[in-house]
Amino acid sequence: MKLHTISINNLKRRKAKMAFLTIGLMVGIATIVTLVTLTRSMSSDIEHKMDEFGANILVTPQSNGLAMNYGGISLGGVTFDQREIREEDLAKIKTIRNSKNISAIAPKVLGGIKVGNHDVLLVGVNFASELKMKQWWKIFGEAPQADNEVLLGNDASKVLNAGSGDSIKIKTETFKVAGVLDQTGSQDDALVFASLPKAQKLLGKEGKISLAEVAALCSGCPIGDMVTQIAEILPDAKVSAIQQVVEGRLKALDQFKRFSYAMAGVVVFIGSLIVFVTMMGSVNERTTEIGVFRAIGFRKSHIMRIILLEAALVSLLAGFLGYAVGMGGAKLALPFMAESKNAHLIWDTTVAFGSIGLALTLGLLASLYPALHASKMDPTEALRAL
Amino acid sequence: MALIEIKNVKKHYTSGDDSVEALRGVDISIEKGEFITIMGQSGSGKSTLLSVLGGMNHPTTGDVEMAGIKLYQLPVEKLADFRAQNLGFVFQSFHLIPYLTAIENVMLPLAIVKTSSAAKKTAARQALERVGLGGKLDRLPNQLSGGEQERVAIARAIVNNPHILLADEPTGNLDSKTSEEVMTLFRELNNAGQTVVMVTHNLENGAYSDRTINLKDGMVVAAQA
């Protein structure tokens, strides 16, 4: 016979009351687990999308000019005092503090050329990084492997009347069309893509680039900070963040996160109240019993240990069940909440241990006053028989 | 020197403007091995006296000395320790813990004692055998008769070999036949050397004791050997 025997046997006897207490606390914990897991999973999904959706930082030459285009209609523009970016400068980007967040750097050189009778825009790219960044590209044929191979945008293919496997002539050189892009609906449709060194040579821009796109992994990385860091090491370049719809979505998610935490707070408060009221009721019901304990020599600390041990056992159970139910709830809700069908649930041990720890802390805190109240009971008053 | 010395103990209860004098200067001396019954009508102060004697009810004035220790000069928690080590209580309504078996109820005072579980179990089993319930160790209180519950309560009170066994109307809820059995049990315990102080209003119970102290209106009016 130890003090815990009393706690455990009492829990066994008051099954209905303890089940109510466990459910009350469990609902609170499950709500928190569901909301935290949902917001984390949805954030991860959005971040994953941002990575897939390509560049979120653009590095262009510094210039004092104003672009004159709107809605895809270009009226030209005035550009002066333009400085160029040297290819070797791009290597510096990998030295910034948040370099581990850089997923890919895609340098580009742009220039107009003539293919047959048509003026087209030639884009020199590093195909490896370009394909990593533009995962939505669908190529009919193959991606270019050699310097004498090109990739045509869908519209360019039609205009130049060249398909996969055909050859086109640029200046004096003949290039094999390795593949043709499926319609993207973007400016890529009108472009001719060649390898960066070959395009630089054709355009007379050896060692120079027109712009570079940087894809940053957004998890835990503030894009704004990265822009500042890149701008510091490339003073002659203009570095800007591409504000995309997904960023707006992240903001909405942040608001949802705050709302979730507020909701969770309210639910936890109610859960704590349930624990408090139930434990207080239990203590009051057990007045005689506590009187007997005190009469036969139990110290105040012994009474507190009995009550708090009961609370701890119930809270631990509520924590385990709350985590399991919460994760189940998150799994059921995620397909409805997340936009992507590929969104996956994040199983985090921090949430698991956190929910159990939170349940234990709440249970013990809410039971502290009832336990103190019990320990201060006067044995004579409590027994009434003496 | 007497085992228990109660000197000029007074106890006043106040409720709003009203004040009730439950004990009005009680002096009692109890020797080791005595069997005392405290008798008196309802409201005479006998239960208050027992609670004062049991270290649970601080007297308004006066001293209670037990085995040379002035009880109410001890800090609250030390007083609890004293009760655990020196006193055994038998309550009128048994006050067994309903979710503990007979042997677990008897082991209750040992729950706060640092000794092995086996030793606790042996002591509880011996106490239950002593009161004639060796065959009902694992019964819950609601599976026992009133007399058996009373015996479990007595076994719980003696399991830690207390110096004094205090009983408050132990036969108050029992029929006459069971009352006789219980009183015989108290007598047997006393014959084995146990000091017993019992509060009762039943005159027949007084016959089992060595001495009867009569209380009236909070004062000792007569002591009979």
Image (spheres, rainbow, N blue to C red):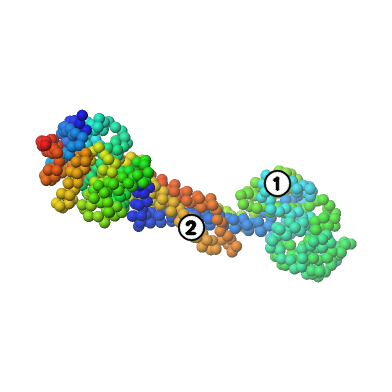
Residue A126 visible? The answer is: yes
Taking A118 as reference, is B63 left or right?
Answer: left
Taking A364 as reference, is A177 left or right?
Answer: right
Q: Residue at x 74, y 51 (%)?
A: A60
Q: Position of residue B41 (x, y in %)?
A: 12, 43
Q: Amino acid at mark 1?
A: Ile
Q: Position of residue A161 (x, y in %)?
A: 81, 70
Q: Position of residue A337 (x, y in %)?
A: 54, 61
Report in which chain the residue with disc 1 lies. A
Q: Is residue A275 above or below residue B5?
A: below
The residue labelled by disc 1 is A230
Taking A171 as reference, is B23 left or right?
Answer: left
- Between A214 and B190, the residue placed more toward the observer is B190
Residue B45 visible? The answer is: no
Label 2: how many Cα within 10 Å (few below 14, some 14–19, many 20+) = some
Q: Name the element at disc 2.
A: helix
What separation in Å lies between label 1 and label 2 (alpha carbons)?
44 Å
Which label sits on residue A305? Answer: none
Q: Earlier in the sequence, mark 1 or mark 2?
A: 1
Q: Residue at x 69, y 53 (%)?
A: A103
Task: Residue lying at the far front in this picture: please name it.
Answer: B192
Quarter holding residue B219: top left
Q: Residue at x 84, y 52 (%)?
A: A206
Q: Amino acid at mark 2?
A: Ala
Q: Position of residue A163 (x, y in %)?
A: 79, 69
- Between A270 and A118, the residue placed more toward the observer is A270
Q: State which mark lies toward you, 1 or 2.
A: 2
The residue labelled by disc 2 is A324
- Between A273 and A124, the residue placed more toward the observer is A273
